Image (cartoon, grey):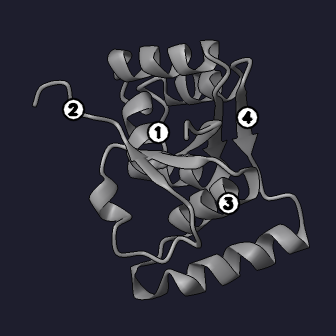
Amino acid sequence: MTPRGYVLDTTVVSEIARGDLPLITMLFELDEHGMQLVVPALVVAAVAAEMGGSDESGFLPAVRGIARLDHGAYGALGGFDDALELGQAAARLSDKRSWEDAHTMVLARRDGVDILTLDAGRWSELELDGVQVAEIADPDE
């Protein structure tokens, strides 16, 4: 079954922020084919922190641009119930949890889409409540 779309994890958003043109082009192509692309709020926050809080790389326009595509979306926390569900998901991820991964999982489950990653291994031992993970193949391998 072909997925309806993807929630982008930190590995993907980090590379977008670094200006990975082949990856950005691939995401534009997915959008052209009607695939939903969701950029989680907590992933944006984690990547911004990873980059030292500066936007010298052009991070905001590149990531914001993906969320503004025809089939793009920004995955925000909308209220108390979203925060509660996020906390419950983080607890299920146990000691391997990160808030951004929990948010990615919650959005994927809510929207019925897969998690898109550059490293499926980082998701392999986590309880994902039936959410599927799709790994982008490295074209250099």
Amino acid, disc 4: Ala
Amino acid, disc 2: Asp
Horizontal side, residue 137 vs residue 38: left or right: left
Q: Earlier in the sequence, mark 3 or mark 2?
A: 3
Which mark is in front, 4 or 3? 3
Query: How far is disc 3 from disc 1 in space, using C-alphas?
Result: 19 Å
Residue 73 badge: 4
Residue 109 badge: 3
Rendered view: 110 above or below 18: below
Q: Nearer the viewer, residue 20 or 93?
A: 93
User: Local crowd at mark 2 within 10 Å, few (<14), some, or many (≥20)?
Assistant: few
Farthest front residue?
1
Q: Would you name the residue on which mark 1 appears?
A: 13
**What residue is at 36 percent from the left and 29 percent from the top?**
18
**What residue is at 72 percent from the left and 39 percent from the top?**
74
Q: Earlier in the sequence, mark 3 or mark 1?
A: 1
The image position of residue 8, as x and y in percent, is: 53, 43
Q: Would you name the residue on which mark 2 appears?
A: 138
Q: Earlier in the sequence, mark 1 or mark 2?
A: 1
